[in-house]
């Protein structure tokens, strides 16, 4: 065995970060295992030499610089390091059960392209700092201290791929015809929706899950997926998306679900695509996807649910732009417009009069 050493008292001092490196003893011997050990040790030596390079990347010591670095860390990977995994992934959108409250349906989203999160259940969002302060219950000072010593300041992108696609339901559509089933007709009438209005926008869908067939009312979205409803089932087929009915009008009316949209059209036959545009979110989690649709409109009327997620989203939208306005007062005291119509009855003249007054 041949052994040689680099003198251990030859420090390399980097004026930029004040780090001193003492070179280790390097061994060399003949044989494949020894060669591997030698290469491994030399590689470690090269890495340490790189720390002596003033141009090498250094972790910041200024609190503002540290905050900037924390703010730009990958949120998806940060949650993964906390043991939090997404429930589903669609393109750049990662959906989670909220890490900051209890819920059973994922409504906490990270847009990886923007590197921002939003919790639809509480109507709040932001960057990694905003999340970590809420999630850890800590101050900014404590956050800097904790993350500086935990290795979190070294960004990485290893936890998840950039894009994945997840099917909500393993279902097969085996039939798509006009509405004709007596049971579905009764269901539409029980929801106080006009059969003719439902027939204009909906189809009768037969779908199969695990070798069993079912009937449902189908409402198509912009990508060809379907929102599915019957008296015992509420679901959707992939792909999930909003439904937009746009004719270039100045006002757009936004509904959380298609039953509310059908109820509105039943109550207000004179307010249709010739006078206003319509967007059905098919779930509040798709609100941000709908935002580009609203850019050309002067007025955006929101008919969202009166539950906490719906109210939070309404407040968030109104804060974005004064052209967003809340119309949930029309069915105050009820979960949504369809719930009001079902329990109170049809009052189209009062509703139409109030709507026309605002135009």
Image (cartoon, rainbow, N blue to C red):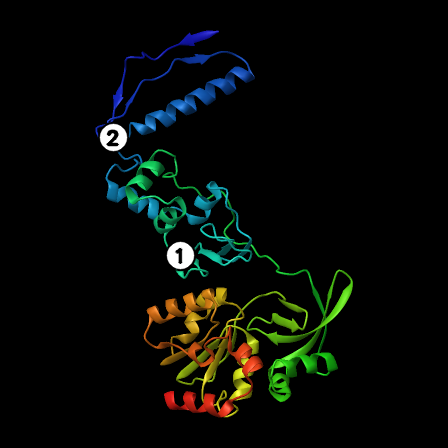
Query: How far from the left and from the top, in percent, is residue 190?
Result: 64, 81
The image quadrant that residue 155 belongs to is top left
Residue 132 position within the rendered picture, expressed as x and y whole percent measured from the top left: 38, 46
Q: Quarter of the image for the C terminus: give it.
A: bottom left
- Nearer to me, 112 or 236: 236
In the structure shown, which secondary structural element does the residue marked by tag 1 occupy? loop
Secondary structure found at label 2: loop
Alpha carbon separation for disc pair 1 and 2: 32 Å
Q: Is residue 218 left or right of residue 208?
A: left
Residue 254 spot, x, y in % from top left: 46, 76
Point 47% across, 79% down: residue:
331
Q: Is residue 297 visible?
A: no
Q: Which residue is mark 1?
A: 114
**Mark 1 vs 2, N-terminal side:** 2
Residue 241's place in the image compared with 50, above or below, is below
Residue 186, how many percent across, how many down? 69, 82
The residue that appears at 48% across and 53% down in the rendered structure is 98
Q: Quarter of the image holding residue 298?
A: bottom left
The one nearer the camera, 246 or 313, is 313
**Which residue lies under the disc numbered 2?**
17
Asked whether the viewer can see residue 141, the reply is: yes
Residue that appears at 62% across and 83% down: 198
Instruction: Tell how many labels.
Output: 2
Q: Residues within 10 Å of mark 2 (few under 14, many from 20)?
A: some
Badge 1 crowding class, 10 Å Cα cut-off, few under 14, some 14 to 19, many 20 or more, is few
| Relative height, residue 355 to residue 90 (above, below) | below
């Amino acid at each position: 065995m041949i052994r040689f050493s680099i003198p251990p008292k030859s420090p390399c001092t980097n004026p930029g970060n004040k780090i001193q490196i003492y070179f280790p003893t390097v061994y060399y011997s003949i044989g494949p295992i020894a060669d591997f050990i030698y290469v491994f040790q030399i590689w470690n030596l090269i890495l340490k030499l790189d720390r002596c390079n003033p141009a090498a990347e250094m972790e910041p010591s200024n609190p503002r610089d540290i905050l900037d670095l924390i703010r730009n860390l990958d949120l998806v990977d940060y949650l993964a390091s906390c043991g939090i995994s997404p429930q589903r992934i669609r393109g750049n959108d990662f959906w989670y059960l909220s890490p900051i409250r209890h819920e059973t349906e994922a409504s906490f989203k990270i847009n990886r392209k923007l590197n921002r999160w939003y919790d639809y259940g509480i109507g709040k969002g932001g960057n990694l700092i905003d999340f970590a302060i809420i999630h850890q219950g800590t101050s900014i000072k404590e956050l800097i201290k904790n993350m500086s010593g935990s290795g979190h300041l070294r960004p990485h992108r290893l936890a998840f791929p950039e894009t994945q696609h997840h099917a909500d339901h393993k279902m097969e559509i085996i039939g798509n015809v006009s509405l004709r089933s007596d049971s579905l007709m009764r269901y539409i009438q029980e929801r106080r929706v006009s059969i003719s209005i439902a027939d204009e926008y909906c189809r009768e869908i037969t779908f199969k899950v695990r070798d069993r067939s079912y009937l449902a009312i189908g409402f198509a979205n912009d990508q060809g997926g379907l929102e599915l409803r019957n008296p015992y089932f509420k679901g959707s087929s992939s792909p999930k998306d909003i439904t937009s009915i746009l004719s270039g009008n100045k006002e757009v009316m936004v509904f959380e679900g298609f039953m509310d949209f059908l109820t509105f059209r039943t109550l207000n036959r004179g307010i249709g695509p010739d006078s206003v545009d319509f967007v059905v979110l098919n779930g509040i989690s798709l609100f941000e996807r709908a935002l580009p649709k609203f850019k050309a409109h002067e007025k955006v009327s929101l008919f969202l649910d009166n539950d906490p997620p719906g109210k939070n989203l309404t407040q968030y939208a109104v804060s974005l732009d004064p052209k967003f306005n809340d119309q949930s007062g029309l069915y105050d005291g009820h979960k949504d417009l369809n719930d009001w119509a079902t329990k109170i009855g049809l009052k189209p003249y009062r509703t139409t009069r109030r709507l026309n007054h605002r135009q």
